[in-house]
Amino acid sequence: MKISTRRVEKTTILDISGDIDLAHSSEVRRLVLVEFRENRTPKLILNLREVNYIDSSGVASLVEGLKASRDVGSRLILFGLSPIAYEVLQLSKLLKIFEIYDSEEKALEA
Amino acid sequence: MLCVVRSALMRLTEEQGFAPAECRGLTRAVDEALANIIRHAYGGRTGQPIELLCRRTEDRTGSGQRAGLEILLIDHGASADRKKFCGRSLDDVRPGGLGMHFIQHAVDVMEFTSKADTNQLRLVKYLPAAESKDQIVKGG
């Protein structure tokens, strides 16, 4: 898994590629929590376009990130969900609690 | 190594004739079961032995025969707490506890046994009747 960080004005974008599984979900969790708790990013966007697989620990990292964003009054936005990532969030009944957009443009405009 | 197992399971389930969503579900179930063994039975220690056995099976308990895939996961770590095998309510939005839900959602049978220092998780998924008939006729 690879993660790179971009900043567009006050928004941070994490471009994630590969599998968010047991071996890598802790890194996603760490980076997301740092953005909210230390950097106080008002809006964090996760680009999941290149993510092939998310397991329950990956979903848990996203949920924890969402809770951290709410704690500090920030926003966590997802875009580019692959069918597999979408399916996992659907199975978890979590689609409605996340802000999800099709494209980076829409996520930035939101 | 989990990504290697996922890749193999996807291929195996496709070969067995499962629908794409069922292939993804079974692969996810085995991945989650392996993650649980690493995390709980072996306390997060990687490099510990886990046996993964797959074989065709048949269900003759109902009115007709159903072909299926039986998957056994065997480890020698700490025994699992059976109370945690029921998963959690999905209405409770919090991290953790989703793995068991994914497993239960994907399989028809889930059995856990523990004897001495050996734990075994048995997962079975049956093919729908039409596909089962094809598999049984092929007999391979």
Image (cartoon, coloured by chain):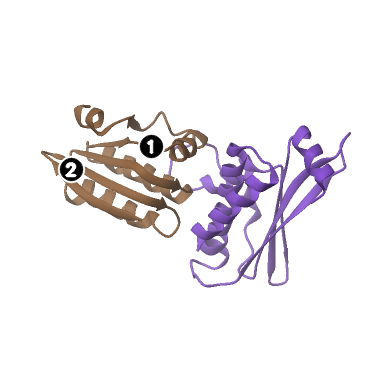
N-terminal-most mark, 1 or 2 = 2
The x and y percentages for residue B109 are 72, 46
Q: Amino acid at mark 2?
A: Thr
On screen, residue B127 versus residue B50, left or right, reads right
Query: Callout 2: residue from which chain?
Result: A
Chain letter of disc 1 in the image: A
Q: Nearer the viewer, residue A101 or B75?
A: A101
Residue at x 54% of width, y 62% of height: B40
Residue A44: x and y, percent?
23, 40
Marker count (numbered): 2
- The residue depicted at 79 percent of the width and 50 percent of the height is B57
Q: Is residue B9 above or below residue A94?
A: below
Q: Amino acid at mark 1?
A: Leu
Name the residue tied to disc 2. A41
Q: Percent position (x, y) of residue B114?
A: 71, 63
Nearer to us: label 1 or label 2: 1
Q: Is residue A20 above or below residue B41?
A: above
Q: Is there one chain holding both mark 1 and mark 2?
A: yes
Colour seen for chain B: purple
* Mark 1 residue crowding within 10 angstroms, few (<14) / some (14–19) / many (20+): many
| Numbered label attached to residue B33 | none
Label drawn at residue A81 = 1
